[in-house]
Amino acid sequence: MQSSHVDALKAKHAGLEARLHAEQIRPAPDVAMIQQIKKQKLKIKEELASC
C-alpha cells in the first residue's frame, strides 16, 4: 500500500515539475503560478521524505 502511495506522490511531483518547466519557458511566466507550483512540490517532497 505504501509503495503505491509513494509512486502516486512521485507521479504528482513529476507532473508539477513539467508544469513548472512549461511555465518558466513561457514568454511571460506567471510568477504567482510558479510560486504555487513550487509550494506544492515542496509539500510532496516533504511527504515523500516522511515515508
Image (cartoon, grey):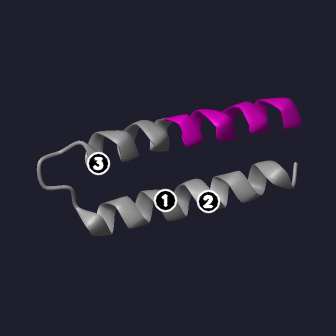
Discs 3/1, front: 3
Per the model, the C-alpha gap separating discs 2 and 3 is 17 Å
Q: Is mark 1 on a helix, strand or loop?
A: helix
Q: What element carries label 2?
A: helix
Judge the density around disc 3: few (<14), some (14-19), many (≥20) Cα neighbours within 10 Å: some
Q: Tell me which amino acid carries mark 1.
A: Lys
Q: Kindly identify which residue carries mark 3.
A: 24
User: Where does the image place residue 1, in percent across and percent down from the top left?
Assistant: 87, 33
Q: Tell me which amino acid carries mark 3.
A: Gln
Q: Kindly identify which residue carries mark 2.
A: 42
Q: Which region is colored magenta?
A: 1-14
Q: Mark 2 near mark 3, Cβ–Cβ under 8 Å? A: no
Left-right relation of 2 to 15: right
Whether residue 24 is visible to the viewer of this picture, yes or no, is yes
Q: Tell me which amino acid carries mark 2.
A: Leu
Discs 2/3, front: 3
User: Where does the image place residue 43, in percent across and percent down from the top left?
Assistant: 64, 61
